[in-house]
Image (spheres, helix red, strand yellow):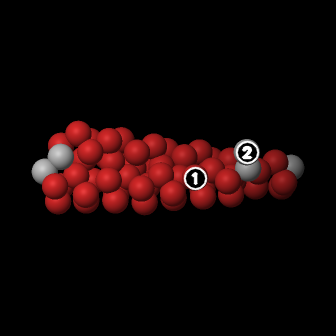
């Protein structure tokens, strides 16, 4: 998958994680809050992978 796809998936996971955390907090569901935090971190990691792919591509393109 290209970096754009990773970025989109990352943003989606990050957003869904934030929503889960908010809902979990609103209803007092700690499990949902933790799941949301994990999903948010997964999204952040996916975006970091995409950024790394972009950086590598720029180096390769300059060579």
Q: Quadrant of residue 30?
A: top left
Viewer-nearest residue: 53 or 59: 53
In the picture as drawn, the residue positioned furthest to the left comes out as 28
The disc label shown at residue 51, or none: none
Q: Quadrant of residue 62?
A: bottom right
Question: In the rendering, at what x and y percent does residue 13 appear?
Answer: 47, 52
Task: Identify residue for label 2.
Answer: 1
Tags 1 and 2 in contact by the CB under 8 Å rule? yes
Viewer-nearest residue: 56 or 2: 2
Q: Secondary structure at mark 2?
A: loop
Question: In the rendering, at what x and y percent does residue 60 appear?
Answer: 81, 48
Q: Quadrant of the N terminus?
A: top right
Q: Upstream in the sequence, badge 1 or badge 2? A: 2
Q: Secondary structure at mark 1?
A: helix
Side of 58 where 11 appears, left or right: left
Side of 53 where 25 appears, left or right: left
Residue depicted at x 59% and y 45%: 49
Question: In the rendering, at what x and y percent does residue 52 appear?
Answer: 62, 47
Question: In the rendering, at what x and y percent does residue 7 appear?
Answer: 60, 56
Q: Residues within 10 Å of mark 1 (few under 14, many from 20)?
A: some
Viewer-nearest residue: 56 or 4: 4
Residue depicted at x 17% and y 59%: 26
Side of 24 where 12 appears, left or right: right
Side of 5 where 61 appears, left or right: right
Task: Identify residue for label 1.
Answer: 9
Q: CA distance from mark 1 to mark 2?
A: 11 Å
């Amino acid at each position: 998958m290209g970096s754009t796809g990773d970025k989109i998936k990352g943003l989606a996971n990050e957003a869904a994680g934030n929503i889960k955390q908010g809902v979990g907090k609103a209803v007092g569901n700690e499990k949902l809050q933790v799941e949301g935090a994990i999903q948010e971190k997964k999204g952040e990691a996916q975006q970091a992978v995409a950024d790394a792919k972009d950086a590598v591509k720029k180096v390769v393109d300059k060579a």
